[in-house]
Image (cartoon, rainbow, N blue to C red):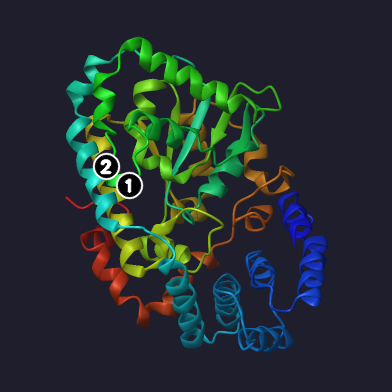
Amino acid sequence: MSLGHALKTVGRQADSVAAYRKAVELQPSLGEAWWSLANLKTFRFAQDDVAAMHAALGAEGLEDDDRLHLHFALGKALEDARAFGPAFRHYETGNAIRRESLGYRAADTSDQVHRAKALFTPDFFAERAGQGCAAPDPIFIIGLPRAGSTLVEQILASHSEVEGTQELPDIITLARRIGGKPAAERDTAYPEALAGLSPADLKALGEEYLERAQVHRKLGRPFFIDKMPNNWAHVGLIQAILPNAKIIDARRHPLGCCFSGFKQHFARGQGFTYSLEDVGRYYADYVALMAHFDEVLPGRVHRVIYEQMVADPEAETRRLLDHCGLPFEEGCLRFYENDRAVRTASSEQVRQPIYADAAEHWRNFEPWLAPLKVALGPVLESYPKAPA
C-alpha cells in the first residue's frame, strides 16, 4: 500500500493501481487500500470490487479505521455508478465514524476569526509598516481543501521562476508557538500575542520560516509555493513577518467545495470536514476573515475563483501571474505536462487538462445538503462575493 502511495505521488498511476490491488488481494479488509484506489479520483471500480468491499464491511472484528475507509470508498464507487442516495449514506457513515475520534469544535474556529478581526486593524499594520523579513520568495496558496488550490499550484509551479513544494506546516507551527502551545486551541494567546512582538522578533520569525522551508527547495528558483490551505487563518501573521510574500486565495462554490471536502477522507487534519454543519460553518468563517483582510489590506490577497479558472484558463492564469509579478509563460497553460511530485488528493486530476464537469458534481447530492446550506447562511447566495 505504501508503494502505491509513492507511485501515485510521482504520477505512475497504473503501477500504483497494481500495488493497491496487490494490497487488497493480500488483505481484503484493508480499508485504506480500497480508499486509496478511490482517492485516485480518475479510477473506476468494477462491480466485483463493490461486492468485495461490501463483503469486507461484513467481516468480524473489523477495525473502525478499516470500516470508515471502506465507507468512503463505497461512496465513491456508488457515486460513479450514479447511485447517489446509497453513495451519500456511505459518505455520511464514514464521516460519522471519523468525527467521533476527533475533538473539532466549530465554535473554536469562529472565536479565532472574531479575535483575528479585532486585532488586525489598519492601524495594526500601519504601525508595523517596513517591519518583518523583506524576502519576496514565498507564494502562499490558501483557502479550503478541494477548492482548486492544487490546480493553482500546478499552474504556478510550471513557471520557470517558481518551485512547487508541498503543504508546509511551518506557519501553523510558528502560530502555535506564539500562542504558547496550549493544550486546547481555545486557550491560545494567539493572535493577540503578536501585538507584543518587536520589529526584531517579526524579522526573526520571517527568517525562521524561510529557513524551515529551505529543505523543500531543490531547484534553485527564486520563488516557491507553500500550499497549506489552513494558512487562511494566518494572513495577519504572514503580513507581519513576510510582508512581500504573495498570497493567493483559491475559492470554489461553497456547495461544491464543502461537499467535496465531506466526501474526502484526509490522512490527517481538516477535522472540520466530517460534518456538513461543521464544514459549512468553517467556510463561512473563512469568507468572513478573508473579507476583513480585503478591507484592511486592499489588494493584498489575489483571489482565484475556481469556476472562472475553468471557464477561461488563459485569462485567469495571466491575472495570477501578473499578481505574482511574473511574466507569462505558455508552459503554465500546459501544467498537466509537469511531472513534479504531487501529494494532495488532486494529484491525478492536475495531470490532465482542465475539465469543467467536476464543478457541478454536488448537484447530484442536493437533496441531502440542507444542513450544509443552513450552516453556510448568506455566504451561499452571495458567492463569489462575500456577504455585505
Instruction: Give the spatial CA distance, label 2 vs label 1.
Output: 6 Å
Residue 13 at what x, y percent from top left?
77, 60
Label 2 with label 1: CB-CB less than 8 Å: yes
| Residue at screen point 58% across, 61% down | 355
Q: Residues within 10 Å of mark 1 (few under 14, many from 20)?
A: few
Q: Quadrant of residue 18?
A: bottom right
In-front residue for pair 21/246: 21
| Relative vertical location of residue 247 with respect to residue 40 in this rendering, above or below | above
Q: Which residue is mark 2?
A: 187
The secondary structure type at the circle numbered 1 is loop
| Residue at screen point 49% across, 74% down | 94
In-front residue for pair 4/15: 4
Indicate left or right for 76 with 141 as reference: right
Q: Which mark is residue 167?
A: none
Give the residue type at disc 2: Asp
Q: Quadrant of residue 278?
A: bottom left
